[in-house]
C-alpha cells in the first residue's frame, strides 16, 4: 500500500512538472519569440492532428507499404543527420577546447595535464575517454579528427536509438518501438550535440542505451536478466564517471527497483549489482587517471558551493555568471577558505529571499533551462563547411527560425506527456516500470539543476531520452480511431468554418509579429574565432626576449574589427623570494598584405571598428623587453592537430602555438528574414489545408472512421 502511495506521489509531481514545462514553453520560451502563445498553440494542435492522421493512414495501408515507408523515412532521417554533421562545424571553445586539446595530447602520449583539469577534475574522465578514441584514429591515420569525432558520436547515438527501439518493439510493443525510434531520431538537439565535444551527447546516448537494457530486464522472458541488468548498471556507472550529476539517475533507478513489483530477493540483488558496479567503475576510473599521469590537487579544485552560489544569484536566472563564477577564486585561498566564503554568500542570498521571491527565482531557473526545446546556447560558432568565412554563422542566419519552428514539437511533446501521466493518475492505472523510472529521471535532473545547481539549456539534454520515452508511450496508447471519430463528429459539416477560424488565427499571429522582419538589430558576425580564452590560468605561453611571432590569415569580408587577446607579464622575485608579476603588453602589428596597409592595434589588442578589409593579413606579436614574458593570448596546443581545418591558424614555424583571436563584422540585420518568416506560416497553412481536405474526403481517405468506437 505504501509503495502504491509513493508511486502516485511521484506521478503527481511528474504531472505538475510537465504541466509547468508546457506553460513555460508556450508563454515564456524565448526572448527571440516569433510567435504569440495563440499561434504556438494553434501550430501544436495542427501538428497533433496531422500526426494522428498519419498514424491512422499508416495503420490501414498494406504491410508491404508500411515496411517501404518505414525504411524510407528512417533512411531519410539518418541521411539528413549525416548531411548536417558533414556540412557544418561547431568550433570548440572554452571547455570543449580544453578537452579536445588535452585528449589529442594524451593520444600522442603527452601527459602534461593542463591546469584547467586541476580546477575541474570532473572533466578528466571525458578527456581520457576521447584520448582512447583518438588513439584509434591515429592508428588508422584519420586526418580530420574533429569531423571524425562528430561521426563517432552520431554513430553511437543512432546505434543506441536502434538498439533501444528494437528492444521495445520486440519485448513491449511494436508500435511503441517504432514511435520511439522516430521520436528520438527527429529530436534535433540530440543530433546537433554530436558536434559538441563534451559529455552531453555521450551521456544522452548512454541513457538511451540504459532504457533499452532495462526493458530487456523488466519485459523480456530471458533467463539472463541479471546479465542484462549488470550491463545496465555498467552503462549507468560509465554515465556517472563521465557526467557526475547523473548520480540522480542512479537514485532514480534505485527508487524504481524498490517500488516496482518484484520479490525482495530480486530487489536486493539488483540494487547490490548496481551499487557494486558503480563503486568498481568509479575506483577503476581513478586507476586509469593515475595511469594517464593525472594527479589531483585538492588545494585548487573548485568547490561545489561555487555553483550553488551562482544558482542563487538574484541578478540572474541562476545561469553561470562571469563575476559570480570567480567571486572567491583568487590565488592563495585554500579550499576551506573558499567554501567558507561561498557558504556565507549562500546564506546571505537565502536570507534575502522571501518564500515568494525564492519560488519566483526557481521559476526563472526552470524557464531558463526548459523554456526552449532547441538547446543551442552553446552554438555561437556553428558554421557551414570547414571555413567560417560566411557573412553570418548558421545561428545568426537561421537560429531564430530553427528555435521557433522546433518549439511546436516541443510543446506537443510536453503537453502529451502531461496528459498521459494525468490520465493514468485519474483512471488509477498502474504505470509501467520504465515510465516510472523515466519520470524519476526527469524529476531528478530538474531537482539537481533547478533546485541546487546553476542552469543552462543544454543541462536538460540528459533528461530528453526519458521525456521522449514517456511521449512515445503516450502516442502509442493514443486511440487513433477514437480521436479521428471525435474530430469527425465535432467538425461534421462545419469543416470550412473551422478552416476559416484557424486561418484567421494564423493570419492574426502572422500580422502580430511581422514587424520583427523589418526591425533592425545589431549582429556581430564572426568570421574568425580561435581557439578559446585560457581562463583557467597557469598555462601561459613563454615568449623569449625580443622574439617575434608571426601568423598569416585571410579575411573574406569587409568592415571587420580584430580582437587579439593581449595579456602578458614578466615574472620576477621580490626580497622574500616570492614571484611578482609585472604586466607588460606585447607589441602587436597587423598588416593587410593585399592592400599593403598597416592596421592600427591598441595596447589591449583591438583594432579600430570596421578597419579590417577583405584580404591577406600578417599578424606580428613582439616581446619588446630584455626578459621573457608570458601571455594568455597564445595557446600551446601541443600535439593537437588543427592543420586539417582552415578555421585555425598557428604561428609560423610553431604549429603548437595558436593565438587567441577574433575577427568580426558588426552589422544591422533583422532578427528573422521575411523569407523564413513567410515560410513558417506558409507551412502551417499548408498543414491546415491538408487536414481540411482529409476531413472533407474522410469517407474515402479515412476508412477507419466507419468503424464503431
Image: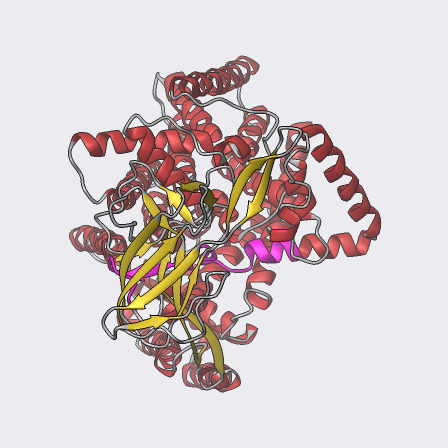
Magenta includes 397? no
For the point 36% across and 47% down, the residue is 547
Residue 601 location (% of width, % of height): 43, 66
Residue 81 location (% of width, % of height): 27, 53
Can residue 499 be seen by looking at this rendering?
Answer: yes
Looking at the picture, does residue 333 appear above or below residue 151? above
Q: Nearer the viewer, residue 2 or 537?
A: 537
Quadrant location, the C terminus: bottom left
Can residue 321 be seen by looking at this rendering?
Answer: no
Q: Residue 146's quadrant in the figure?
A: top left
For the point 44% across and 80% down, the residue is 670
Specify start and end residues of the magenta stretch as a single range: 364-389
Quadrant location, the N terminus: top right
Residue 706 location (% of width, % of height): 34, 65
For the point 53% across and 21% down, the residue is 262
Q: Nearer the viewer, residue 433 or 704?
A: 433
> Is residue 6 toward the left or the right of residue 33 in the image?
right
> Is residue 177 toward the left or the right of residue 278 in the image?
left
Looking at the picture, does residue 178 appear above or below residue 492? above
Magenta includes 377? yes
Amino acid at each position: 500500500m505504501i509503495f502504491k502511495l509513493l508511486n502516485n506521489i511521484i506521478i503527481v509531481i511528474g504531472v505538475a512538472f510537465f504541466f509547468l514545462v508546457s506553460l513555460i514553453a508556450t508563454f515564456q520560451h524565448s526572448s527571440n519569440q516569433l510567435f504569440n502563445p495563440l499561434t504556438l498553440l494553434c501550430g501544436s494542435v495542427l501538428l497533433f492532428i496531422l500526426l494522428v492522421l498519419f498514424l491512422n493512414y499508416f495503420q490501414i495501408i498494406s504491410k508491404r507499404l508500411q515496411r517501404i515507408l518505414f525504411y524510407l523515412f528512417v533512411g531519410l532521417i539518418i541521411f539528413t543527420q549525416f548531411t548536417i554533421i558533414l556540412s557544418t562545424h561547431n568550433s570548440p571553445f572554452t571547455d570543449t577546447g580544453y578537452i579536445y586539446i588535452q585528449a589529442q595530447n594524451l593520444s600522442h602520449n603527452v601527459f602534461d595535464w593542463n591546469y584547467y583539469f586541476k580546477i575541474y577534475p570532473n572533466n578528466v574522465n571525458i578527456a581520457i575517454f576521447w584520448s582512447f578514441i583518438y588513439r584509434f584514429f591515429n592508428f588508422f591515420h584519420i586526418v580530420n579528427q574533429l569531423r571524425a569525432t562528430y561521426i563517432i558520436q552520431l554513430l553511437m547515438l543512432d546505434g543506441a536509438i536502434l538498439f533501444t527501439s528494437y528492444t521495445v518493439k520486440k519485448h513491449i510493443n511494436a508500435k511503441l518501438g517504432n514511435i520511439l525510434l522516430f521520436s528520438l531520431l527527429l529530436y534535433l538537439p540530440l543530433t546537433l550535440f554530436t558536434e559538441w565535444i563534451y559529455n552531453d551527447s555521450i551521456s544522452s546516448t548512454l541513457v538511451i542505451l540504459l532504457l533499452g537494457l532495462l526493458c530487456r530486464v523488466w519485459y523480456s522472458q530471458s533467463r539472463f536478466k541479471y546479465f542484462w541488468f549488470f550491463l545496465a548498471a555498467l552503462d549507468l556507472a560509465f554515465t556517472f564517471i563521465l557526467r557526475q550529476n547523473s548520480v540522480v539517475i542512479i537514485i532514480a533507478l534505485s527508487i524504481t527497483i524498490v517500488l516496482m513489483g518484484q520479490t525482495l530477493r530480486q530487489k536486493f540483488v539488483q540494487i547490490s549489482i548496481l551499487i557494486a558496479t558503480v563503486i568498481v567503475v568509479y575506483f577503476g576510473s581513478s586507476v586509469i587517471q593515475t595511469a594517464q599521469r593525472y594527479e589531483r590537487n585538492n588545494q585548487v579544485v573548485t568547490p561545489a558551493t561555487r555553483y550553488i552560489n551562482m544558482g542563487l544569484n538574484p541578478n540572474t536566472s541562476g545561469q553561470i555568471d562571469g563575476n559570480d563564477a570567480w567571486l572567491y577564486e583568487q590565488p592563495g585561498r585554500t579550499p576551506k577558505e573558499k567554501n567558507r566564503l561561498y557558504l556565507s554568500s549562500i546564506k546571505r542570498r537565502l536570507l534575502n529571499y522571501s518564500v515568494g521571491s525564492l519560488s519566483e527565482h526557481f521559476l526563472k531557473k526552470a524557464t531558463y533551462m526548459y523554456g526552449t526545446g532547441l538547446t543551442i546556447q552553446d552554438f555561437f560558432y556553428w558554421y557551414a563547411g570547414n571555413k567560417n568565412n560566411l557573412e553570418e554563422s548558421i545561428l545568426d542566419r537561421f537560429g531564430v527560425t530553427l528555435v521557433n519552428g522546433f518549439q511546436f514539437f516541443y510543446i506537443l511533446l510536453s503537453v502529451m506527456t502531461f496528459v498521459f501521466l494525468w490520465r493514468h493518475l485519474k483512471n488509477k492505472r498502474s504505470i509501467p516500470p520504465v515510465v516510472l523510472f523515466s519520470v524519476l529521471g526527469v524529476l531528478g535532473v530538474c531537482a539537481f539543476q533547478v533546485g541546487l545547481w546553476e542552469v543552462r539549456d543544454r543541462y536538460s539534454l540528459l533528461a530528453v531520452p526519458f521525456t521522449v520515452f514517456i511521449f512515445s508511450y503516450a502516442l502509442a496508447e493514443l486511440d487513433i480511431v477514437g480521436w479521428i471519430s471525435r474530430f469527425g463528429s465535432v467538425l461534421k459539416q462545419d469543416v470550412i468554418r473551422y478552416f476559416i477560424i484557424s486561418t484567421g488565427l494564423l493570419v492574426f499571429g502572422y500580422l502580430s509579429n511581422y514587424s520583427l522582419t523589418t526591425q533592425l538589430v545589431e549582429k556581430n558576425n564572426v568570421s574568425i574565432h580561435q581557439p578559446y580564452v585560457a581562463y583557467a590560468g597557469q598555462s601561459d605561453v613563454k615568449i623569449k626576449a625580443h622574439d617575434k611571432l608571426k601568423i598569416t590569415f585571410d579575411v573574406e569580408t569587409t568592415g571587420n574589427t580584430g580582437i587579439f587577446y593581449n595579456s602578458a607579464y614578466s615574472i620576477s622575485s621580490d626580497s622574500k623570494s616570492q614571484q611578482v608579476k609585472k604586466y607588460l603588453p606585447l607589441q602587436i602589428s597587423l598588416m593587410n598584405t593585399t592592400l599593403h596597409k598597416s592596421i592600427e592595434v591598441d595596447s589591449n589588442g583591438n583594432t579600430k571598428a570596421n578597419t579590417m578589409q577583405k584580404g591577406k593579413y600578417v599578424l606580428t606579436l613582439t616581446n619588446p623587453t630584455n626578459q621573457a614574458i608570458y601571455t594568455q593570448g597564445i595557446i600551446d596546443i601541443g600535439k593537437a592537430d588543427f592543420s586539417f581545418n582552415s578555421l585555425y591558424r598557428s604561428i609560423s614555424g610553431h604549429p603548437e602555438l595558436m593565438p587567441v583571436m577574433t575577427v568580426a563584422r558588426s552589422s544591422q540585420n533583422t532578427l528573422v528574414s521575411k523569407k523564413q518568416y513567410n515560410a513558417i506560416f506558409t507551412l502551417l497553412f499548408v498543414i491546415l489545408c491538408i487536414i481540411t481536405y482529409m476531413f472533407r474526403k474522410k469517407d474515402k481517405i479515412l476508412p477507419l472512421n466507419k468503424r464503431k468506437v
